[in-house]
């Protein structure tokens, strides 16, 4: 801190050593003109200093000011704070000003630094608040579609149930069918655009009458409140069904999408949000199992079926480990000189479960396919059936055909052909003695790769049969592209022979298939009338209860011994 005195008459200022040091002036000289000192004051502060002095002299204000000076010896900017009072002569006139000045540079820098940090903290606090609000939003909303997410939906459902006045609530789960194909074909960016378009349609269709949420990658949920069920649930779901009537278009890409829909109703089906959502899921999976692209309303029997399904899935794992599967064999016959003669057998799996009894394939094969266990089961069937055929051929010195059903899951695996060839080599069975039965579903979406695999097996001599012809998507023109050696006419056609309905259709199929150089087999032959008609229609092979039901391996030797007993 230093002292200064300004003589108003001479315009000279006396400075103490401390003030001289503040201004960076030469020591030893204490008197300077006012103009000289003003030259060292920062240009932006000069007017403020002059005005403060003038107000002090005129008695308008106290002199209390902070200003900057530029040090003469090193051009350093310093902050000074000064207070002053006037001195009077005997006449009461102002003659001089006496002041105290203090170097407040460090304090000012410290204060300025605090202000800067405070501004930064304020800015960071705002950023933090904005981010917190964003995180809170994302915690309850889907980032892609901007719809409420699963957390929001469950919270909303819970609160709605608690404040519900006794009216019905409807919970809907909507799962897009085969949406993975869209992502695989066009990429996830385009896939997200389709999800956005679906979201827009869902919101528009309900127009604020319900809560629409996206609860997983390709699943949406809806909550509809205050529902009147006098007219049933169908009118309520009509807007939802209409969402998928028209194709969706994104970036000049147009696709037709479908959905499997499950519905549960409060309080009839459940009284908690978890149970309502779970029951809607059960109904949605029922819609999937019924071929997709449909809507199912929850029923208690669906839950019972689900528990049975889960039980079968668990028991299947044990069945594989404990070798609980057995093969039954149904004979197949060829027609020679108008009479049937044994051709071979179709191997049909059964599950001899200690807990469930003897189960047919329809009871467990679909579950095995969905869980992937069908691969292990199918390999066991193939090896066991080939061993049986080899044993019979060697024992009775004859040539037989062993037909084995192949699941799409097995055939879609890259190593399928290698496993078939390995089984043939290990069992010693001749390739022409093996016939693989496939269904039309194997070719859907993967026609080229599947057709190439089967063509390679045919080149080795293995027979390829198309099973259940007429029940799916096959057409006669389609058959020309398939690498098959045998077409099996479904038993539903054969059963119509006795009723004289569409008999000509079977005969026409046989004639046309023969022109494609493909053999035919009729399934489900049960009566003599059916047998005679099929023989006259030149059907190559026959199979059905008329010749024998599927039996275990220990009972088929007598069939082979007699070779032909008709």
Image (cartoon, rainbow, N blue to C red):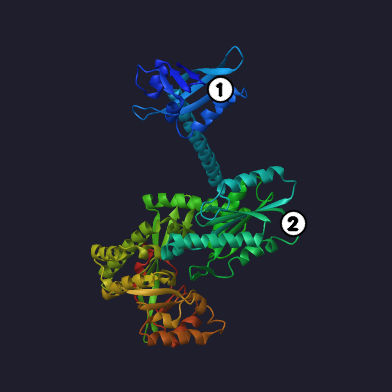
Which numbered disc covers residue 144?
Answer: none
Residue 407 visible in the current orientation: no
Identify the image quadrant of the C terminus: bottom left
x 61%, y 14%: residue? 91
Residue in front for this viewpoint, 266 or 376? 266
Q: From the viewer's perspective, is 90 left or right of 105?
A: right
| Circle 1: element type | strand
Tell which tag, 1 or 2, sits nearer the viewer: 1
Rendered location of residue 60, percent (x, y): 62, 24
**Residue placed under numbered mark 1 in the picture:** 63
Residue in front for this viewpoint, 177 or 418? 177
Rendered location of residue 325, percent (x, y): 40, 56
Identify the image quadrant of the N terminus: top left
| Circle 2: element type | loop
Q: Within 10 angstroms of label 2, few (less than 14), some, or many (20 or more) residues?
A: few
Residue in front for this viewpoint, 245 or 503? 245
Q: From the viewer's perspective, is 241 left or right of 552?
A: right
Placement of 183 over or under 356, stated as above or below: below
Q: CA distance from mark 1 to mark 2?
A: 83 Å
x 59%, y 50%: residue? 277
Rendered location of residue 420, percent (x, y): 29, 65
Rendered location of residue 85, percent (x, y): 56, 17
Q: How many marks?
A: 2
Q: Within 10 angstroms of label 1, few (less than 14), some, or many (20 or more) residues?
A: many
x 24%, y 62%: residue? 426
Residue 10 visible in the current orientation: yes
Q: Which badge, 1 or 2, is on the more N-terminal residue?
A: 1
Which numbered disc covers residue 228?
Answer: 2
Q: From the viewer's perspective, is 342 left or right of 174?
A: left
Placement of 546 over or under 179, stated as above or below: below
């Amino acid at each position: 801190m230093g002292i200064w005195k300004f003589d108003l008459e001479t315009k000279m200022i006396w400075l103490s050593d401390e003030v001289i040091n503040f201004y960076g002036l030469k020591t030893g000289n204490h008197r300077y003109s006012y103009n000289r000192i003003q030259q060292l004051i920062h240009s932006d502060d000069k007017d403020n200093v002059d005005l403060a002095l003038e107000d002090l002299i005129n008695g308008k204000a106290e002199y209390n000011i902070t200003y900057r000076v530029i040090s003469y010896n090193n051009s350093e900017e310093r902050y000074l704070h000064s207070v002053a009072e006037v001195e009077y002569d005997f006449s009461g006139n102002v003659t001089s000003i006496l002041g105290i000045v203090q170097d407040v540079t460090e304090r000012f820098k410290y204060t300025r630094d605090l202000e800067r940090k405070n501004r930064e903290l304020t800015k960071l606090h705002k950023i933090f608040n904005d981010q917190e609000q964003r995180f809170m939003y994302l915690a309850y909303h889907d980032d892609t579609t901007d719809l409420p997410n699963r957390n929001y939906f469950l919270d909303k459902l819970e609160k709605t149930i608690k404040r519900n006045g006794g009216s019905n609530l409807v919970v809907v789960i909507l799962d897009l069918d085969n949406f993975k194909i869209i992502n695989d074909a066009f990429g996830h960016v385009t896939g997200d655009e389709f999800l956005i378009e679906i979201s827009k349609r869902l919101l528009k269709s309900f127009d604020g009458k319900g809560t629409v949420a996206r609860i997983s990658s390709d699943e949406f949920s809806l909550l509809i409140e205050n529902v009147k069920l006098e007219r049933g649930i169908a009118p309520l779901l009509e807007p939802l069904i209409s969402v998928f009537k028209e194709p969706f278009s994104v970036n000049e890409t147009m696709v037709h999408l479908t959905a499997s829909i499950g519905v549960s109703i409060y309080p009839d089906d459940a009284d908690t949000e978890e149970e309502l959502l779970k029951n809607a899921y059960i109904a949605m999976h029922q819609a999937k199992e019924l071929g997709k692209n449909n809507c199912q309303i929850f029923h208690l029997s669906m839950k019972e079926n689900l528990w049975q399904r889960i039980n079968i899935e668990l028991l299947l794992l044990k069945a594989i480990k404990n070798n609980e599967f057995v093969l039954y064999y149904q004979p197949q016959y060829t027609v020679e000189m108008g009479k049937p003669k044994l051709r071979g057998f179709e191997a049909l799996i059964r599950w001899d479960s200690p807990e469930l009894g003897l189960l047919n394939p329809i009871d467990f094969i679909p579950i095995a396919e969905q869980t992937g266990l069908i691969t292990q089961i199918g390999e066991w069937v193939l090896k066991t059936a080939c061993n049986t055929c080899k044993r019979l051929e060697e024992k009775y010195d004859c040539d037989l055909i062993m037909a084995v059903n192949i699941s799409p899951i097995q055939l879609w695996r890259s190593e399928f052909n290698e496993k078939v060839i390995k089984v043939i080599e290990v069992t010693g069975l001749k390739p022409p003695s093996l016939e693989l039965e496939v269904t039309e579903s194997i070719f859907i979406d993967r026609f080229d790769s599947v057709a190439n695999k089967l063509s390679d097996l045919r080149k080795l001599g293995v027979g390829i049969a198309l099973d259940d012809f007429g029940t799916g998507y096959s057409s006669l023109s389609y058959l020309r592209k398939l690498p098959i050696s045998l077409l099996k006419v479904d038993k539903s056609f054969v059963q119509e022979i006795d009723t004289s309905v569409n008999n000509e259709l079977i005969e026409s199929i046989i004639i046309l298939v023969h022109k494609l150089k493909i053999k035919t087999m009729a399934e489900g032959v049960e009566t003599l009338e059916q047998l005679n008609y099929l023989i006259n229609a030149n059907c190559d092979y026959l199979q059905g209860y008329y010749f024998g039901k599927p039996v275990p391996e220990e009972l088929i030797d007598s069939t082979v011994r007699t070779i032909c007993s008709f």
